[in-house]
Image (spheres, grey):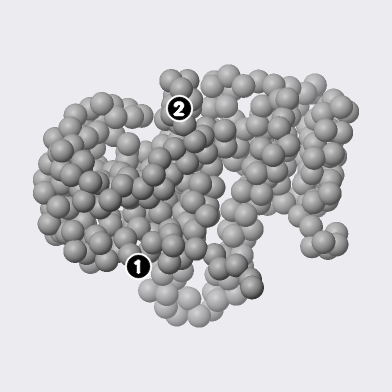
Amino acid sequence: MNNAEKNTLLVVDDTPENIDVLRGILGADYIVKIANGGQLALKITAAQPPDLILLDVMMPGIDGYEVCRQLKENEATRHIPIIFVTARGEVADETLGFELGAADYITKPVSPPIVHARVRAHLALSNQRRYLEQLVAERTGELERSNQQLAKTHLVMIQQLGRAADYRDNETGMHVMRVGNFSKLLGLACDFMESRAELLMYASMMHDIGKIGIEDSILLKPGKLTAEEFEVMKRHPEIGAGIIGDHDAEVLKMAKQIALTHHEKWNGQGYPHGLSGEAIPIAGRIAAIADVFDALTCVRPYKQAWSIERALELIEKEAGQHFDPRLVKLFMGLETEVRRIATEYSDAANAPQENK
């Protein structure tokens, strides 16, 4: 790959040894620019924005948090993914970073495979977003004459971003497609209007986007998570809600609601806020059934796939505990359509084809 085809990264750190480590890890695959302080990082970014920034926190003068805040407040630079690379690994430190708009957090000493995986994931998300924004921009004239087409394009963007996040632990990205279609099916059974059920489908595809903030060693762990690891995993609903943010668009409002509440339980034993019963928004209750059912019937790093029959038995058993009992009853009556969706959007049917 020549330099014209490489993404540009900006590494910001006041310690030369740390810069050398990251340049050694990433230099063969990316154009790596260097800033030894926050002020220089802001200057370089303003002059020629990089594709991604790896940012130290503890620096003299302007620290990493302030650099992140200023970049995210600037319309010209707010889109740049920022990964904090720091020795400060406390939950409070990571929470502050995500609140300021950081895309991810890597603790020192860094692991080369993790650095590569995180950089690739966030560049993929960023490149997808820029591509879609460019596509929308190129078609502005046409879309202004068709509000319906504009809305459709926005929904496709949401779908693609949901799939991009899903690629981290599902090479086909089909999990979010199935969850979206199961959610729409259940929404229609709840007498949602077609238009609202369609919004629910797209919004539910963003349910796990917060997992891009969970480290690979936990997200892809083949065995059972420790109590400490599960506490980290339990942060992904709030990370997801933060990534989606606050918007006027109904589909994004619903997407944020689902991201935040799809792990709440009818009996109040879920997370992150311990909501119970109808205090859980119905979109979150619907997505919870769709997500758990699909997770049960698919291979995951820590489990084999269950049969549809066994998964439906568990869903029915958890009525009134994990799930809204009325929704469970409706879902159990949709088995034929559920099977159709599971087949149409199966991982096997949509797996990448090898070149022969």
Task: Give the class, few, some or many, for how many residues have Cα within 10 Å of label 2's Cα (few <14, many ≥20).
Answer: some
Q: What label does residue 344 carry, if any?
A: 1
On screen, residue 254 versus residue 125, left or right, reads left
Q: In the rendered view of the protein, which quadrant contains the C terminus? A: bottom right
Q: Secondary structure at mark 1?
A: helix
Q: Residue 327, relative to residue 237: is it above or below?
A: below
Compared across the picture, whether 226 is left or right of 3 comes to left
Say whether residue 236 is visible. Answer: yes
Q: Residues within 10 Å of mark 1 (few under 14, many from 20)?
A: some
* Residue 27 image offset from top left, x and y in percent: 84, 46
Task: Return the x and y of residue 286 as percentages of the image width and height.
Answer: 24, 48
Can see residue 246? no
The residue identified by callout 2 is 225
Eyeballing the image, is 57 above or below 292? above
Specify the quadrant of the image occupied by residue 230: top left
* Residue drawn at point x = 27 percent, y = 55 percent: 183
Q: How far is disc 2 from disc 1 in space, using C-alphas?
A: 32 Å
Nearer to us in this view, 69 or 25 = 25
Query: Looking at the picture, which amino acid does disc 2 mark?
Result: Leu
How many numbered marks have been drawn onto this rendered protein structure? 2
Of 65 and 12, nearer the camera is 12
Quarter of the image that includes the N terminus: bottom right
First in sequence: mark 2 vs mark 1: 2
